[in-house]
Amino acid sequence: MENNFSVENSLRLITETIERSRSTIVKNAGKPLIVWGFLVSLTSVIIYFLWKYAGGPVWNFLWFAMTAVGMLCMYFMERNREKAPQSEIGRILGKIWMWFGIFATGVFALVWVAFFIKTAITPGATVRLDLTLVISLMMGLCGAISGSVINRKVISICSVVATACSTLWLLISAEGSPERILCFALLGFLALVIPGIILQKEGGR
């Protein structure tokens, strides 16, 4: 009986700890989602206009500048927020988005490496990979997984809808056109800003 009681208490304690961790993450996740969603959407629109009117796809390097600005915003937000112990769920979410960043940056770098190698061998050659589609699918997948981890269906649903809309946009837009980059404006708004606003309201209650 004592062993059963101890096991039941342990399971209940673990469950309560996980739920508290989820609640804390949900409470603190709204603003970062809104900030990143706004940055992704704004950067997408800026790159679109610069690509169309001032120099071509080279402006995609602005994504690295956006990442630096986003990290700086997160630093100041974390500095002004009360420190909380790192939870297992928080660690998992961090790893999910860390690997998204590594894979997205790695694929981007590999495309350019392949381009330079291929043009060195065959001048005028091109490398054909729909990098925009690959990264948007990875982003949507990570968002859906994150929603499942913190047990918030709204995040998963918004990520699925955002991925479907952005993929449809890419399929109907002309290949190689600057309009394709606007799929990230859709992703940023639908998969990040809207869930962020919902979580912010939920955390404020």
Image (cartoon, rainbow, N blue to C red):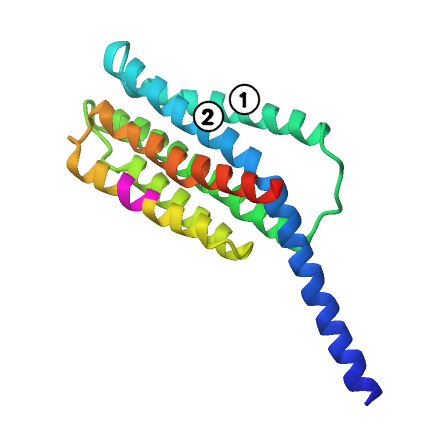
What residue sits right under mark 1 in the picture?
69
Q: Residue at x 59, y 46 (%)?
A: 26
Q: How many marks?
A: 2
Q: Residues within 10 Å of mark 2 (few under 14, many from 20)?
A: many
Q: Residues within 10 Å of mark 1 (few under 14, many from 20)?
A: some
Residue at the bottom extreme, as displayed: 1
Badge 1 element: helix
* Residue 170: mark in rendering: none
Amino acid type assigned to the residue bearing label 1 in the image:
Val
Q: CA distance from mark 2 to mark 1?
A: 8 Å
**Residue 56 shown left or right of residue 41 in the figure:** left
Q: Look at the image and give the residue range highlighted in magenta.
A: 162-166
Rendered-image quadrant of the C terminus: top right
Residue placed most toward the observer, 103 or 17:
17
Residue at the front extreme, as displayed: 205
Q: Position of residue 171 (x, y in %)?
A: 18, 40
Q: Residue at x 53, y 57 (%)?
A: 151
What residue sits right under mark 2 in the picture?
39
Amino acid type assigned to the residue bearing label 2 in the image:
Leu
Q: Quadrant of residue 60?
A: top left
Residue placed most toward the observer, 142 or 116:
142
Q: Of discs 2 and 1, which sits in the foreground?
A: 2
In the figure, 81 relative to 195: above or below?
A: above
**Residue 4 shown left or right of residue 136 in the figure:** right
Badge 2 element: helix
Q: Residue at x 63, y 49 (%)?
A: 90
In the figure, 167 relative to 5: above or below?
A: above
Label 1 near label 2: C-beta < 8 Å? yes
**Residue 182 shown left or right of residue 14 in the figure:** left
Whichever of callouts 2 and 1 sits on the residue coming sooner in the sequence is 2
